[in-house]
Image (cartoon, grey):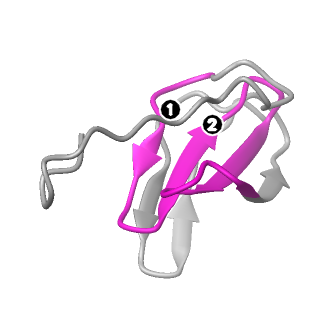
Amino acid sequence: YRLSTGAEVKLELQDLPSPIAASPVATASRLYVPGADGRLYALAAGTGTLLWSYRTGGPLVAAPLPRGEVVYVASSDN
């Protein structure tokens, strides 16, 4: 649901190569999805198109925290 317009927004995440490990987080332009495969996926908020992914050293265990140009994640690696 988009508050600014009142329009319903649907994204289908069925094309991700991994199950979702924790809560996704949305910004104005991105949806950050933590994967059980240890990758953080960045999708375009308007279309759901995969923009990039980043592999960490272990499964992601919490929702990502985007701050400016940086996205903080917690993984179960050592």
Instruction: Tell me the kind of residue under disc 1.
Output: Ala
Query: Can you identify the residue that label 1 sits on?
Result: 62
**Dot 2: what SS?**
strand
Which residue shows up at 62% across the image and 22% down it? 21
Instruction: Tell me the kind of residue under disc 2.
Output: Pro
* Residue 57 screen position, x and y as percent: 85, 42
Give the extent of the magenta segment: 21-50
Q: Is residue 22 above or below residue 2?
A: above
Pointer 2: residues within 10 angstroms few (<14), some, or many (20+)?
Answer: many
Q: Is residue 77 magenta?
A: no
Query: Can you identify the residue that label 2 sits on?
Result: 34
Towards the viewer: 21 or 1? 1
For residue 43, the mark is: none
* Residue 20 screen position, x and y as percent: 64, 23
Towards the viewer: 48 or 61? 48
Q: In the rendered view, does 8 fall on the left or right side of 26?
A: left
Which residue shows up at 78% across the image and 35% down it? 77
Question: Exactly how many numbered labels are in the figure?
Answer: 2
Can you name the residue that lies furthest to the bottom here?
69
Marks 1 and 2: in contact by CB < 8 Å? Answer: yes
Res 12 seen here: yes
Q: In the rendered view, does 4 fall on the left or right side of 42?
A: left
Q: Is residue 29 magenta?
A: yes
